[in-house]
Amino acid sequence: MDRSAEFRKWKAQCLSKADLSRKGSVDEDVVELVQFLNMRDQFFTTSSCAGRILLLDQGINGFEVQKQNCCWLLVTHKLGVKDDVIVALKKANGDATLKFEPFVLHVQCRQLQDAQILAVRSTHGLEVPLSHKGKLMVTEEYIDFLLNVANQKMEENKKRIERFYNCLQHALERETMTNLHPKIKEKNNSSYIHKKKRNPEKTRAQCITKESDEELENDDDDDLGINVTIFPEDY
């Protein structure tokens, strides 16, 4: 069996399995994105989360949060409500931690070049301990403050999902056009090589200047959620 046929078989098997997540279905905010990827021959999704706010009870063995071995006191894929957190905290017996987890998407790709199109990084999370051995260590005012921060991150997270989806569509459309017209790709590559040979120092200086400008622009936002170098430069 060739690799393409093996990949198709693996994809069919994975997509036919029951959803074993706690929710039991794909989150509403990423349904369209997941369907878009699964319709393409070179991808299939294995898990996803549109982003969520969690309150976890770790127990009394330390602050390291291991979701497999803790109690989920509260989970929502929408904006958090302070009263819900306060009620849930009363059930904590150990170290309760409030978390915001951003959009996550795990995708199986047929080839390395397909995986490169989906390159994503993010530091858009939040994790704060609230209680220790069942005792609340912060004020309700601070909990309200944390929820405002988490909710702002949730709103930004939705924007990043949309931006990622739009960039992905654009990148795949461009890839399709390139594959349909290989002569254009060859011509562009030849032109680039010719220009680079003609004035390599000038080209190098321009690249360094561009990279420096991008680094300065990105200092105000720790992460855009997308490795933009993967996507077209004129997007």
Image (cartoon, grey):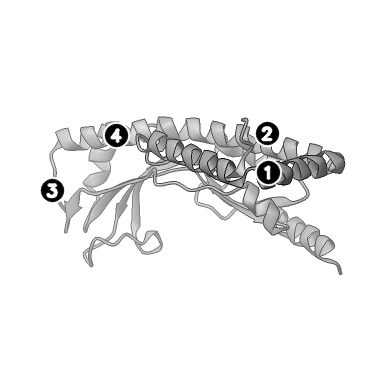
The amino acid type, in three-letter code, at marker 2 is His
Residue on which disc 4 sits: 149
**What residue did someone put label 3 on?**
137
Q: Label 2 crowding class (10 Å Cα cut-off): few <14, some 14-19, many 20+?
A: some
Mark 3 or mark 2: which is in front?
2
Amino acid type at image mark 3: Met
Question: Which of the two residues, 1 or 129, is positioned nearer the viewer here?
Answer: 1
Element under disc 2: helix
Give the residue displayed 72% in from the left and 54% down from the top: 16
Q: Establish if 107 lies above or below 230.
A: below
Q: Residue at x 71, y 40 (%)?
A: 172
For numbered disc 1, what is the local secondary structure?
helix
Mark 3 and mark 1: Cα distance apart in space: 66 Å
Whether residues under marks 4 and 3 lie with C-beta atoms below 8 angstroms apart, the answer is: no
Residue type beneath disc 4: Val
Residue wearing tag 2? 170
Mark 2 or 1, nearer chain start: 2
Q: In the rendered structure, are the residues bearing label 3 and label 2 in contact, judged by CB atoms less than 8 Å apart? A: no
Tell me residue 23's x, y (percent): 51, 46
SS under mark 4: helix
Which of the two marks, 4 or 3, is nearer to us in this view?
4
